[in-house]
Amino acid sequence: MNATGSTDVFVDHRNLLFTVAYEMLGSAADAEDVLQETWLRWVEVDRSQVRDERAYLVRIAARLALNRMRTNARRRESYVGPWLPEPLLTAPDVAEDVELADSVSLAMLTLFETLGPTERAVFVLREVFDFGYDEIAAAVDKSPAAVRQIAHRARGHVAERRPRVEATRSEREHVMATFLAAVATGDIQSLMDVLAPDVVLVTDGGGVKKAALRPILGREKVVRFLDAVAEGLEAVADVVVVNGAPALRIVLDGELDTIASMVVENGLVTGLYVVRNPAKLARLDAVVTLTR
């Protein structure tokens, strides 16, 4: 067995494997664990028997991620408040790949949480990474016919819940700049003007930071909550690219406190995803490379 050759192949596909695991799990920490386990299994493989190294590695990673998804589902029953995905600083090329940027957005990863583990695995592998039904079947231990049915069901589920109108990058940037200015100046009216009447705010403090225990629906209630949380705080805010889209970064006393990502439709914010759990902000000191 050529360990050097195995290492080279793994390194060549590492970013892909991380992206697959992250999209399935919504957690960079869990995705890194899956990568480690994938590597340990890969070095034991007789590569002379492997026809397609990329597909084989993805199959290992997908199986491991699927097992972890099932374990995580039980753990999250005791999570305090809403659970949101772990945000990542991403390189500009992610935003340029529209399909990839859409699939790793915090809104889409949160939507993925409403799928069952197998449905999520099938959807990610088929719709995002364009793997064939036979390859996916081997990864999830189902027949190709069953995978087709699961994919059809998952596509319908996601289509019903995703944003009705996709905002352009320039629209998102404009709304983000307006939102940032309103927050910085405390201009409540400007903040109201950029929020849709039926905006939904979801906050994740992990039981450590102040956050709403349930989603907040409606412009007036959202503004009241944001105003109450910000009262008396001296914060510095700027815009960064998180999960392929502009997001608001808020720093308190020199430490990262909050990442806020938005869903924009027809020039208004319809969804606001706010991550304050410190454990989920620990990796935001370096840009992560995601790829298909």
Image (tube, rainbow, N blue to C red):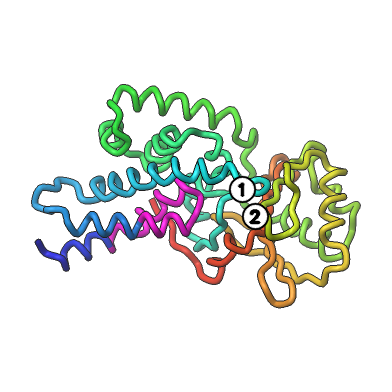
Q: Position of residue 266 (x, y in %)?
A: 72, 40
The amino acid beneath tag 2 is Gly
Q: Which mark is residue 79?
A: 1
Q: Are marks 2 and 1 in contact (CB under 8 Å)?
A: yes
Residue in view at x 34 percent, y 47 percent? 64
- Magenta includes 26? yes
Quarter of the rendering containing residue 249: bottom right
Q: Position of residue 72 (x, y in %)?
A: 49, 45
In the rendered structure, the answer to whether residue 154 lies left or right of residue 231 reads left
The amino acid beneath tag 1 is Tyr
In the rendered structure, the answer to whether residue 115 lies left or right of residue 19 reads right
- Cα–Cα gap, marks 2 and 1: 7 Å
Q: Is residue 98 above or below residue 250?
A: above
Task: Say which label, 2 or 1, has the lower sequence index.
Answer: 1
Q: Position of residue 60 (x, y in %)?
A: 28, 47
Label 1: element kind: loop
**Residue nearest the viewer, comparing 57 with 241:** 57
Q: Which mark is residue 206?
A: 2
Q: Which residues are magenta?
A: 11-34
Label 2: element kind: loop
